[in-house]
């Protein structure tokens, strides 16, 4: 029996199964005492190793996907953002939108949890074995600009498109560099109806012409990004500033920054006032 155990131990070492190796002696003692069957013993050894490998895969996946610091759905304080429908977020965490190649838009003022939710959904995708990549819009455009300059733009686009889910964070926070809007359009167009995306922004869609510095490109972007889209708007105060609300002017605490722009002013003379009809008081 000892020779067989030694052989099993050597095989586990050769197969690089350290967790199964650690559990071997205890499992064999339970087997000898009749506390489990041979099949149960095999299942326990394999389960230990599989759990260990899944844990390492998940940890590495979160790191390479740039989802650090890691956020979770469970860690989001839904009570602080009553405008947010928790059931919609839980439904998104089932990841059906990835299979359908849809785009999720998370819109709201700074500090309302957009990046937290985007990261948490990315973490769920990694847990499910999907390839994910997360970056800010400024970082994405910088990578595309450098790739184009070096003659590697197609290669960089393939890099982004290898991921089942691409998360582009912080749209509207920083100005887009000249030519960046066109490069981002090429990325969006290459993923259109093929790969899912999550976009976060503190600016409404009506302001994207200003954000990207080109209304024509912004319209083309929205044409693709809103075709198969899920739009979630979060209205509320900043979670990060919750302990300092007394320092913020009251009229700005809950005002969303994604309200539509005011209607254009009419040119020419103002319309004449119509005389009041006294028949109706």
Image (cartoon, rainbow, N blue to C red):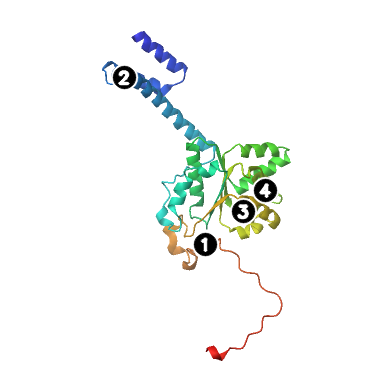
Q: Residue at x 69, y 44 (%)?
A: 145
Residue lying farthest to the front in this orientation: 279
- Looking at marks 1 and 2 on the same chain, the residue that comes earlier in the sequence is marked by 2
Q: Give the residue pinned by disc 3.
A: 174
Position in image of residue 25 (x %, y %):
33, 18
What element does badge 4 sit on?
Answer: helix
Label 1, label 3: how many angstroms apart (C-alpha)?
18 Å
Q: CA distance from mark 1 to mark 4?
A: 27 Å
Residue linked to disc 4? 185
102 or 159, nearer to the observer: 102
Q: What whole-number distance in Å separates the C-alpha atoms at marks 4 and 3?
A: 17 Å
Q: Quadrant of residue 41?
A: top left
In the rendered image, which residue does mark 1 sit on? Answer: 256
Q: Could you say whether the residue bearing mark 2 is in a helix, strand or loop?
A: loop
Q: Residue furthest bottom?
A: 278
Disc 1 from disc 2: Cα separation = 62 Å
The local crowd at label 3, few if under 14, some if 14 to 19, many if 20 or more residues have their Cα within 10 Å, is: few
- Depth check, mark 1 against mark 3: the one in front is 1
Q: According to the image, label 2 marks what residue? A: 37
Marks 3/2: CA distance? 63 Å
Q: CA distance from mark 4 to mark 2?
A: 60 Å
Within-10-Å neighbours for mark 2: few <14, some 14–19, many 20+: few
Badge 1 marks a residue whose secondary structure is loop
Circles 1 and 4: CB distance less than 8 Å? no
Q: Residues within 10 Å of mark 4 (few under 14, many from 20)?
A: some
Location of residue 53 with respect to 73 vertically, above or below? above
Vertical relation: 152 (above or below) 44: below
Identify the residue shown where x is 42% and y is 22%.
18
């Amino acid at each position: 029996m000892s020779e067989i155990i030694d052989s099993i131990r050597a095989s586990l070492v050769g197969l690089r199964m350290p967790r199964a190796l650690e559990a071997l002696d205890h499992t064999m003692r339970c087997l000898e005492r009749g506390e489990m069957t041979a099949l149960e013993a095999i299942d326990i050894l394999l389960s230990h190793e599989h759990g260990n490998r899944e844990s390492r895969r998940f940890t590495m996946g979160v790191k390479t996907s740039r989802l650090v610091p890691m956020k979770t759905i469970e860690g989001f304080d839904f009570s602080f953002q009553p405008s947010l429908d928790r059931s919609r977020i839980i439904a998104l965490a089932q990841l059906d939108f990835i299979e359908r190649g849809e785009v999720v838009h998370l819109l709201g003022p700074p500090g309302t949890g957009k990046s937290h939710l985007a990261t948490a959904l990315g973490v769920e995708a990694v847990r499910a074995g999907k390839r994910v990549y997360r970056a800010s819009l400024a970082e994405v455009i910088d990578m595309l600009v450098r790739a184009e300059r070096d003659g590697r733009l197609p290669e960089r686009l393939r890099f982004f498109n290898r991921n089942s889910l691409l998360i582009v964070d912080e749209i509207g926070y920083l100005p887009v560099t000249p030519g960046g809007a066109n490069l981002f359009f090429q990325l969006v167009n290459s993923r259109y109806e093929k790969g899912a995306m999550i976009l976060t922004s503190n600016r409404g869609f009506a302001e994207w012409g200003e954000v990207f510095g080109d209304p024509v490109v912004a319209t083309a972007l929205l044409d693709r990004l809103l075709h198969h889209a899920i739009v979630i708007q979060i209205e509320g105060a900043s979670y990060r500033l919750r302990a300092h609300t007394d320092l913020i002017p009251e009229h700005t605490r809950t005002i969303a920054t994604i309200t539509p722009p005011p209607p254009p002013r009419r040119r020419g003379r103002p319309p004449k006032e119509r005389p009041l009809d006294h028949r109706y008081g």
